[in-house]
Image (cartoon, helix red, strand yellow):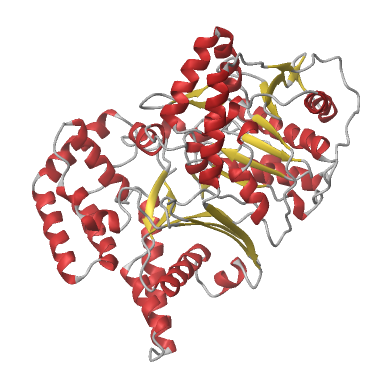
Amino acid sequence: MENQLAKSTEERTFQYQDSLPSLPVPSLEESLKKYLESVKPFANEEEYKKTEAIVQKFQNGIGEKLQQKLLERAKEKRNWLEDWWLNVAYLDVRIPSQLHVNFGGPASHIEHYWPPKEGTQLERGSISLWHILNYWQLLRKEKLPVHKVGNTPLDMNQFRMLFATCKVPGITRDSLINYFRTESEGHCPSHIAVMCRGRVFVFDVMHEGCLMTPPEILRQLTYIQQKCRREPDGPGVAALTSEERTRWAKAREYLISLNPENLTMLEKIQSSLLVFCLDDGSPRVTPEDYSQVATKVLTGDPTVRWGDKSYNLISFSNGVFGCNCDHAPYDAMVIVSISYYVDQKIFESEGRWTGSDEVRDIPLPEELVFTVDEKVLNDINQAKAQYFKQASDLQLLVYAFTSFGKKLTKKKKLHPDTFVQLALQLAYYRLHGRPGCCYETAMTRYFYHGRTETVRSCTVEAVRWCQSMQDPSTSLFEQQHRMLEAFAKHNKMMKDCSTGKGFDRHLLGLSLIAKEECLPVPELFTDPLFSRSGGGGNFVLSTSLIGYLRVQGVVVPMVHNGYGFFYHIRDDSSSIKEENIREVT
């Protein structure tokens, strides 16, 4: 990506959007066949036969009618799934989304020029912000290179949602507001929000048509921090965004009813390019162990994060950074892209600003002082209490595996990602003595507004291999043979899912058609094997490859007593992020 950015290119970031193929509707027969294969590891013979009969009945009956309805929908929409997925996966969800839906991760600057060091928070923050804002300008000018696989362009729409985007709570469904515009489209907000000790400030990053320099950004951040240190803490209105969604929606309505100016201030936060979070924490971190900082990024002080924002950049007092982002507007590859860009820029400049130290006469930041009363303060305290209670139920470990990495697996002609996925299956099998239903993310960006599909990594082939590894009487040759079968199956599934031939999103579409038509829920979706195999978001293992760069990321597991497993694979090492949620009693 960095090499591409250095080249001048005539291609515009969003130029291929109109020519991308529509998201296809898979064959009903093929999807149901794949579904049946996926439930086998979790069923005995009797259970499987029962499910097989249910699937056959569905295919020959209501399933065919639902498939026709879905095909009709696909004729009218270039992406038949897009609106449904946004609503079902994100906007309709009522549990607190800041903790349960958002993703985030620690920055890797500590591995080169920015090791933890007290007193560097603001200076480093101003440089980091400047690089991020340059990326924003690349997007506005459509100079960010189009992502491609070979010569095939991928959908870039999610990059429109990185800046100036915010989720707004609703009583039954949230909404997503995007204020970003390219230069050719018109005006785009150019202010950022800064949160510090329960208070909120905003300032414009453009002055007289030019982007502020790091010394100028530093002046603004210094003013805010000094003011917050001299004066009492603010009420921490931001903590309300960590609440259960309907409670937050009601609290927001009440806040607005107190004073119309509260709405104006909320809209300034919503439309800001991003939120810069001045966190007083000083988490421990080393290249080998990111556990503490990753925990703080995901579960830190809710009064200095706006949980609904598409981008919270977190700056800790020891000069360590991270981000926390709402998952609704985009998937992790967007934040991976900008994080890699910023990390490379910091590495190239050795973490320093070498330009002018001159600071123009720029207006001071504006503080957003909300009108609050006893009820609002009680709502804030309740939000913080539930947030910290749920956060305490999460265990998070981020360790570096340094024995080998991508180079060795590729040398052995084994796909690095599949290698990790099968290792994960074996680890779960050894730990629990049974297969673990597993979700791995596949991207569908070959298609218009494509996002993700589910790869179900726990295959019959993977389980057979795990069993052979646990059986001392199995020969090494047989173990290797079964391993290669499991590799081949996983690689094919990933290819199918990326090219629109997955089945989980297809089944979701069929179930939603039935709901829209006011039909009874088909037995396929109430069958115990459906949820036991992971259907309906019940995967015990929630996993994703973050990439082959230095960038890291994490999101909480899907279910209680589940695991989240997020990893990036370098040439000679891997970084493993493993989480476990204990059941709250």
Position of residue 345 in the picture relative to residue 470 (left or right): right
Q: Is residue 208 above or below residue 437?
A: above
The answer to which quarter of the image holds residue 23 is: top left
How many marks can you see? Answer: 0
Image x and y of residue 72, in percent: 20, 33
Q: Is residue 130 visible?
A: yes
The answer to which quarter of the image holds residue 575 is: bottom right
Position of residue 46 in the picture relative to residue 394 (left or right): left
Q: Nearer the viewer, residue 58 or 73?
A: 58
Residue appearing at x 13%, y 55% in the figure? 54
Residue ranking furthest to the top: 260
Position of residue 573 in the picture relative to residue 281 (left or right): left
Q: Is residue 577 above or below residue 4?
A: below
Q: Is residue 336 visible?
A: no
Q: Nearer the viewer, residue 270 or 464?
A: 270
Residue appearing at x 73%, y 19% in the figure? 206
Image x and y of residue 24, in percent: 30, 42
Q: Nearer the viewer, residue 206 or 532?
A: 532
Image x and y of residue 554, in percent: 55, 50
Residue appearing at x 67%, y 33% in the figure? 135
Image x and y of residue 275, in percent: 64, 29
